[in-house]
Amino acid sequence: MPLNPNKYIKSTRQLVADQILKPFQRFFNKEVASSILLITATIIALIWTNSTIGETYHRFWHTEVSLALGHFHISKTLVHWINDGFMSLFFFTVGLEIKREILVGELATPKKALLPVIAALGGMIVPGLIYAALNAGLPTISGWGVPVATDIAFALGAVAVFGRRLPVGLRIFLAAFAIADDLGAVVIIAIFYTKEIVWSYLIISLFLIFGLAVANFLWIRQTLIYAILGLAVWFFVLGSGVHPTIAGVIVSFFIPARGRYDTDNFLQNVKKITEKFECEEQSCGYSILLNQEHMDAVQALEMACHDVETPLQRLMHALHPWVALLILPFFALGNTGLTFHNIVFSELVSNPVIIGIIFGLVFGKPIGIMLFSYLSVKTGIASLPQEVRWSHIFGGAMLGGIGFTMSLFLADLSFSGPQMLNYARIAILTGSVLSAAIGMSYLGFICISAPDRE
């Protein structure tokens, strides 16, 4: 009995619709799971560094790990491999998400993009100014970039607690805002945290980037080509003195966002292929083992699915779980190990680094996000998402003060001394916890006072 092609086409259309309409939901779920692992990794790091075997923490993460191939040799500590190597993969996936949002997502049209982009701009300017004002004339002024970042995993994880009692538009706004914020952090790293440039390496990396552009222009879809060129770009950017995480974002922008053919052609091909499934009896059973034509049809279906899927989607689907569930928790484990043994607690309330970061995250973030969002809507430049009120935006703005991953990353670039880095970590953890607690309490009050959305 032949299979019903119309039924198969209908299910295929549903599958394609899911791929187009539900990427945000999958992205959101992975970020929520990542936030749980980040909390766990942070607790483990704090317990480890302040236990009787605390010295093993620093000894372990500062173990030298070398790669050698002939005369080529590169040696870094384990924590630097994570920060310079694996975090480049994190920034690569961030870049893929930014590109997808620009093409078909919440940043695809000026009206959609302007509100989260302007909000992110305000959420970076005001915290940076607060920190700079409190550290003006001091060597610690270099840490002004620490409170400008938002951790998307923790922010979305906090929103997830309320389920459907908050509008979907708030989740999308917060995700788009955090993505725009990440892009701003990348620009800050590239411009302000590059200390010395080796021009020969940088020129080579530019030629390799041009090679990526040519591959994209020629519609080359083999991800291996982009992987080889991308690794080469990362290596030469690393040697140039520019932070190598920038390479991850740059390479991501050249990953093709179109398949070999469109969905209409895909559906036509699937219809032709499914017509080959004809069986003499009522059920085909395990005909794949017996019927070569059926086996060929299955392989043709597999190839058709591969060709319609874009390299950008394929890489996002493959890498995002590794980044969210492994790389980021390992980053937190290796970078949040602050020790309380040598800290003079009476200095904490007066230390400008701590005050600047906490004030920047807890007060600067929501003030900047709300002020710039309000001005953009009132001037008609942007509009609020559907079903989202100003009270929702204010709650989301408070959650924007959860810096954590990106703030820890910028702190590592800002401070070389262990004491200042320790102070920065204390401030980041304190500011992020306060922002999460205040933001969730406020949104919880809104959910209780507003009608249930379930």
Image: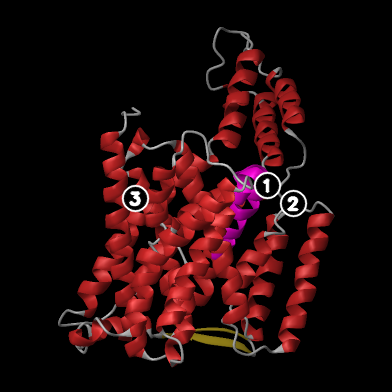
Residue corresponding to mark 2? 221
**x and y, in percent, of residue 159 in the image:** 36, 46
Image quadrant for the N terminus? top right
Q: What span is in magenta? A: 91-114
Residue under the image location 37 percent in, 49 percent down: 395
Q: Are marks 2 and 3 in contact (CB under 8 Å)?
A: no
**Residue 301 visible to the viewer:** yes
Residue corresponding to mark 1? 110
Q: Amino acid at mark 1?
A: Pro
Residue corresponding to mark 3? 158
**Residue 65 visible to the viewer:** no
Image quadrant for the C terminus? top left
Which secondary structure, mark 1? Answer: helix
**x and y, in percent, of residue 214 in the image:** 83, 62
On the picture, is 426 further left or further right than 377? left
**Quadrant of the rendered image containing residue 55:** bottom left
Q: Is residue 319 above or below residue 144?
A: above
Tag nearer the camera, 3 or 1: 1
Reading the chain from its start, which is encountered first: label 2 or label 3? Answer: 3
**x and y, in percent, of residue 134 in the image:** 40, 82
- Asked if residue 231 lies in the magenta stretch, the reply is no
